């Protein structure tokens, strides 16, 4: 069933543009792969901190330049 969904997603032009197909990835950040709970927490915090549009700066940042 999953392969059918992945195939359908790969044929969807909107999902192709965003590189999303639902196939997942081949690596994990878990204890079995040698990552601690703190490593996982740090990675999650980093990923959540990434600015989706870094070219757009708040007015206060522009004024400080």
Image (cartoon, grey):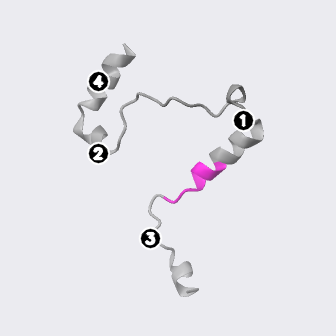
Q: CA distance from mark 4 to mark 3?
A: 35 Å
Q: Is residue 59 left or right of residue 33?
A: left
Residue 7 is tagged as 4
Q: Which mark is residue 47?
A: none
Tell me which label, 4 or 3, sits earlier in the chain: 4
Q: Earlier in the sequence, mark 1 or mark 4?
A: 4
Say which label, 3 or 1, has the lower sequence index: 1
Residue at left offset 29%, top offset 45%: 17
Q: Which residue is identified by label 2?
A: 17
x, y percent for residue 57:
49, 73
**Image quarter (top left, top right, bottom left or bottom right) of the C terminus:** bottom right
Distance Cα–Cα, label 4 vs label 2: 15 Å
Q: Which residue is mark 1?
A: 35
Residue beneath label 3, please?
A: 56
First along the sequence among labels 2 and 3: 2
Mark 4: few/some/many CA within 10 Å (<14, 14-19, 20+):
few
The tag earlier along the polypeptide, 2 or 1, is: 2
Image position of 60 with respect to 31: above or below = below
Q: Which residues are magenta?
A: 45-51
Q: CA distance from mark 2 to mark 1?
A: 32 Å
Image quadrant occupied by the N terminus: top left
Instruction: Give the residue at the far top of this rendering.
Output: 1
Q: Position of residue 46 (x, y in %)?
A: 63, 52
């Amino acid at each position: 069933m999953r392969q059918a969904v992945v195939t359908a997603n790969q044929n969807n032009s909107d999902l192709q543009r965003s590189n999303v197909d639902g196939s997942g990835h081949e690596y994990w950040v878990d204890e079995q792969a040698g990552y601690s709970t703190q490593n996982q927490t740090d990675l999650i915090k980093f990923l959540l901190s990434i600015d989706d549009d870094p070219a757009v700066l708040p007015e206060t940042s522009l004024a400080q330049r």
